Image (cartoon, rainbow, N blue to C red):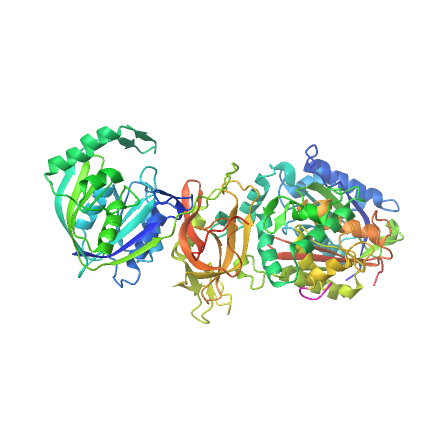
């Protein structure tokens, strides 16, 4: 067993030190972006997905299907939703059989925002062996089902009775090549040479560290902390594919929120649209080949009824028309930009919001790709769909 | 099929009528229409009524018309066809009278847009008019509907934001003389271009205001027209056209195919063409839309809208005055009432009684487009019977 590919994703907003998300990204969309990066070109059939995070959007269920749909893997793939931080993500990799995609995602406050994914397979890659595991309770941050977080706010206690106590008990006395889940200064003190800087401190952090080790072909001890818990692994690094989706950070757009009446969700409509909407699939007529998005009962081309089959649509998109809404809209921060974009050369268009770019910075003819986003949250339900991410170019001001 | 005449027309002022409900505005418009009839008109003559209302203010629309106007013995049908509601209500009443089943029909349109908070209206409408799963989480509020078209139109045609501003300046100028108009003040090109942005490319002065109001027409069969007036206005043509509902299915967003279809039907029925139109009231909910209307209605060639507005032809005094009432832009836009109010203006134009009279107007056209730009209605009126 080895980690044969790694994918990382950082939201575009924030600073080099700390990335943040807008409401259109959550742990599921972050995980999908990192997971797709890990899978890109791997050709591996995914048999299981382990989703490690402390920021599950839906506690009662529903994350798994959205994750599988966004990743574009089979809907009967096993999904393990694992509540945990940095040690839990490493534990998940250690316990994984070939064909498992382990994704760590951080979307909350205090950890930075980002996600990283490790594809476990057979063959050359990073080999992990457990060096030590410590599981002690020191809930310096306490968060219960109601979502309210209570911070003890005592960094020295966390360092002494968390990090150091865990390390002492583990008996691991060697210097590490990377330490995550703790502050950069503390990490540097535990490492030999220059420790890799990782952008998060939660579940995605050790996977970001593995990507850094793969990049530099460094082997050695990796320490993953969370409060007073520690998982330490010996990493032997051979060639592994690393795909980073990490654009340069940019400051958040100036937007205003407007209170107002909520348009409630129809779960019947949500359910009908789910596969096409979250997998970005159109209806294809088996008689004339015409594609339609959304899929429809009666073919746009030949009028055949009830026969359409779902077909995956290209994500490459070109803007046909675009507008930016400045007027206050309840429930959507303004200004925001929407586009109608052609998907590849299929003749199929999608109406979508723009993501990852300042409002007003997209023009007719611009190219980009459709990416999974939380398009809206209605009645507490994350409504996943696709948004237009323009190809990278210099930051422009709001027109 | 027999011919149908308009013998009476009336409307309330279009405004933010915070002090008047739908049950006040509807009878006010009906009474004004009844009182506009040249000879004696007895309400008991009304055989049936059609009521165009987009939203449902204060409950059951057909009942509100019958009840508030004292017409409890009159059958009432409610019409809802997005922003084409008013002209579609006329179209349905015309069918009833033309068939011979009725002699006298009342057509009323009304809406109370300002029953909601100014910020909430577009959002509430979005919930009414969008695909529940695919459209409205994205945030295509009403102006964005049209903005997606106009942005592409500006990209492909010679029209610019300045040409859009010319529409606003013209229609505001026209509205000044109209006592029923909501916005009765002049504006300049600079005012339009420097106004706060609403939805790109529309600034504040590119947009219709949010309005309350009601309008009413009395339609009668040709055999009974002279009981009511010696100078009726004839309904020469009506047409309705539709298109794909979702924007992503509209191949060419620089045109509104529903308008083209509705106009083709109305012109054919009337036996006239665009060159015969002396005055028109067209849908200018957003300035750029009026430019596209010119082309879709055949007033100029494709992408000739910019040159037409620039030439001054569509101002009163020009070759083909458009929106002498001020249009939706200055007169206001309570959707159910809008199309009927257009015909109230044209009724007056064709009888030489408008406050902004187009000299010698004989053939007139009214037009609406809406309903995520998937429906349009056109009505052609004339002072000439055929």
- Magenta part of the protein: which range? B299-303
* Residue at the image point whose x is 70% and y is 54% from the top: B92
* Residue at the image point whose x is 87% and y is 44% from the top: B40
> Which quadrant of the structure image shows residue B332?
top right
Q: Nearer the viewer, residue B118 or A285?
A: B118
Magenta span includes B293: no
> Residue A125: horizontal and vertical position, in percent?
19, 58
Magenta span includes B301: yes
Q: Is residue B234 left or right of residue A194?
A: right
* Residue at the image point whose x is 28% and y is 31% from the top: A142
Q: Quadrant of the N terminus of chain A?
A: bottom left
Count the labels in the image.
0
Residue B198 lies, with reference to residue A72, above or below; the image says above
Residue furthest out toward the left: A171
> Residue B375: horizontal and vertical position, in percent?
63, 56
Q: Nearer the viewer, residue B286 or B377?
A: B286
> Which quadrant of the structure image shows residue A131?
top left
Q: Is residue A58 left or right of residue B184?
A: left
> Residue B374: horizontal and vertical position, in percent?
60, 57
* Residue at the image point whose x is 83% and y is 52% from the top: B349
In this orientation, does residue B99 appear? Answer: no
Residue A256 lies, with reference to residue B192, above or below; the image says above
Residue furthest out toward the bottom: A288
In this orientation, does residue A198 appear? Answer: yes
């Amino acid at each position: 067993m080895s980690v044969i590919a790694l994918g990382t994703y950082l939201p575009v907003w924030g600073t080099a030190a700390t990335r943040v998300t807008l409401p259109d990204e959550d742990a599921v969309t972050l995980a999908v972006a990192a997971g797709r990066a890990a899978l890109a070109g791997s050709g591996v059939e995914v048999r299981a997905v382990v989703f490690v995070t402390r920021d599950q959007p839906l506690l009662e269920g529903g994350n798994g299907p959205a994750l599988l749909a966004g990743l574009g893997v089979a809907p009967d793939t096993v999904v393990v939703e694992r509540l945990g931080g940095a040690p839990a993500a490493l534990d998940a990799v250690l316990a994984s059989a070939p064909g498992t995609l382990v994704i760590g995602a951080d979307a909350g406050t205090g950890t930075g925002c980002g996600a990283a994914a490790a594809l476990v397979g057979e063959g050359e890659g990073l080999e992990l062996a457990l060096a030590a595991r410590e599981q002690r309770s020191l809930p310096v941050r306490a968060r219960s089902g109601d979502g309210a977080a209570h911070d003890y706010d005592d960094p020295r206690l966390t360092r002494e009775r968390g990090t150091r106590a865990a390390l002492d008990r583990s008996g691991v006395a060697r210097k590490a090549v990377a330490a995550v889940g703790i502050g950069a200064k503390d990490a540097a003190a535990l490492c030999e040479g220059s420790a890799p800087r990782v952008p998060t401190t939660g579940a995605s952090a050790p996977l970001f560290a593995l990507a850094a080790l793969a990049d530099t072909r460094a082997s050695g001890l990796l320490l993953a902390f969370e409060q007073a818990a520690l998982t330490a692994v010996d990493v032997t690094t051979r060639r592994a594919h690393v795909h980073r989706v990490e654009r340069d950070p940019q400051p958040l757009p100036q937007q205003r929120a407007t209170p107002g009446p909520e348009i409630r969700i129809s779960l019947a409509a949500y359910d009908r649209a789910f596969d096409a909407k979250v997998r970005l699939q159109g209806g294809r007529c088996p008689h004339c080949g015409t594609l339609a998005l959304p899929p429809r009962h009666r073919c746009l081309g030949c009028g055949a009824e009830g026969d359409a089959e779902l077909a995956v649509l290209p994500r490459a998109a070109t803007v046909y028309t675009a507008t930016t809404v400045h007027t206050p809209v309840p429930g959507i921060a303004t200004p925001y930009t929407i586009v109608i974009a052609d998907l590849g050369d299929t003749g199929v268009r999608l109406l979508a919001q723009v993501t990852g770019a300042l409002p007003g910075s997209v023009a007719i003819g611009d190219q980009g790709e459709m990416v999974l986003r939380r398009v809206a949250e209605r009645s507490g339900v994350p409504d996943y769909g696709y948004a237009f991410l323009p190809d990278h170019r210099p930051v422009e001001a709001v027109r | 099929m027999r011919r149908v005449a308009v013998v009476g027309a009336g409307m309330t002022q279009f405004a933010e009528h915070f002090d008047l409900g739908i049950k006040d505005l509807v009878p006010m418009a009906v009474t004004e229409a009844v009182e506009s009839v040249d000879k004696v008109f007895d309400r008991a003559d009304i055989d049936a009524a059609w009521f165009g209302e987009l939203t449902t203010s204060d409950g059951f629309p057909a009942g509100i018309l019958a009840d508030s106007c004292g017409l409890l013995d009159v059958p009432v049908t409610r019409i809802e066809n997005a922003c084409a509601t008013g002209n579609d209500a006329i179209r349905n009443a015309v069918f009833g009278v033309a068939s011979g089943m009725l002699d006298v029909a009342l057509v009323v349109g009304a809406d109370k847009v300002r029953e909601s908070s100014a910020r909430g209206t577009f959002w509430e409408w979005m919930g009414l008019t969008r695909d529940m799963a695919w459209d409205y989480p994205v945030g295509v509020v009403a102006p964005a509907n049209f903005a997606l078209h106009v942005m592409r139109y500006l990209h492909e045609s010679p029209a610019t934001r300045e040409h859009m501003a010319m529409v606003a300046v013209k229609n505001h100028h026209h509205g000044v003389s109209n006592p029923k108009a909501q916005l009765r003040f002049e504006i300049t090109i600079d005012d339009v271009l420097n106004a706060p942005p609403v939805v790109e490319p529309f600034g504040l002065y590119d947009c219709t205001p949010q309005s309350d109001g009601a309008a009413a027409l009395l339609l009668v069969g040709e055999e009974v027209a002279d009981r009511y007036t010696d100078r009726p206005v004839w309904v020469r043509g009506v047409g309705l056209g539709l298109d794909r509902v979702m924007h992503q299915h509209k191949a060419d967003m620089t045109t509104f195919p529903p308008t083209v279809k509705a106009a083709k039907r109305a012109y054919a029925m009337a036996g006239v063409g665009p060159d015969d139109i002396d005055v028109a009231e067209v849908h200018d909910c957003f300035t750029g839309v009026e430019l596209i209307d010119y082309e879709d209605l055949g007033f100029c060639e494709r992408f000739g809208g910019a040159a037409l507005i620039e030439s001054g032809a569509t101002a009163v005094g020009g070759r083909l005055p458009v929106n002498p009432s001020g249009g939706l832009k200055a007169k206001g836009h309570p959707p159910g009432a809008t199309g009927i109010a257009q015909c109230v203006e044209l009724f007056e134009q064709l009888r030489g009684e408008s406050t902004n009279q187009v000299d010698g107007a004989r053939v007139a056209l009214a037009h609406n487009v809406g309903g995520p730009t998937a429906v349009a209605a056109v009505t052609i009126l004339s002072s000439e019977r055929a």
